[in-house]
Image (cartoon, rainbow, N blue to C red):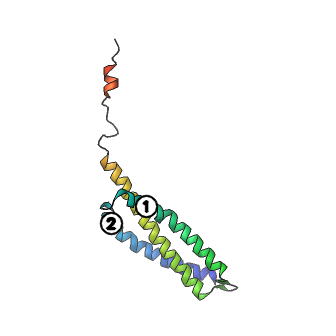
Amino acid sequence: MIWQQAALSFLVWLLYGTLMRRRSGDLRIRLRETRRKTKVLLGSVGLIGGAILLLGGLWQIAALGGIGPSGLTIWAWVGVTLLGLVFVHLQVLGAAAMITLIQESETAHLNGASDTRRSSDESSERPE
């Protein structure tokens, strides 16, 4: 029975991820207006904190007896599904924050990769 419960929870997570994917453009637009430090914090907490929260929550559910002989208890199944939804949400938020950070640093860089200008030190040393 645990495989059926896991498959249904996984389906819910995929559907929520698809919904979040469609809304990620709006999320990135809002994140562009936030400060750089806030984006770094959101990205780190979203990506790393989400994983810690998920693993800690799953451990807590198992420690409280949420796994029975026939699979997850009802409360544990709901808890696992909710933990997965929070994890997906934090991963999307963290990834969007990191993407806007990368885009911000790329657009702020004025010189292109093929810039062949010499620095003033190099131009003053000419071979004779």
State the residue position of label 1.
Answer: 41
| Point 47% across, 64% down: residue | 45
| Point 35% across, 71% down: residue | 23
> In the rendering, at what x and y percent does residue 64 appear?
65, 82
> In the rendering, at what x and y percent does residue 104 appear?
33, 53
> In the rendering, at what x and y percent does residue 38 appear?
38, 61
Q: In the picture provided, is 97 more to the left or to the right than 62?
A: left
Residue that extends furthest to the bottom in the rendered view of this protein = 74
Sequence-wise, which precedes: disc 2 or disc 1?
A: 2
Residues at circles 2 and 1 in contact by the CB criterion of under 8 Å: no
Residue nearest the observer in this picture, 59 or 128: 59
Q: CA distance from mark 2 to mark 1?
A: 20 Å
Residue that extends furthest to the right in the rendered view of this protein = 69
Residue 88 tag number: none
Q: In the picture provided, is 89 more to the left or to the right than 80?
A: left
Dot 2 falls on a residue whose secondary structure is helix
Q: Residues within 10 Å of mark 1 (few under 14, many from 20)?
A: few
Q: Quadrant of residue 69?
A: bottom right
Q: Residues within 10 Å of mark 2 (few under 14, many from 20)?
A: few
| Point 31% across, 60% down: residue | 32
Of tags 2 and 1, the one toward the viewer is 1
State the residue position of label 2.
Answer: 25
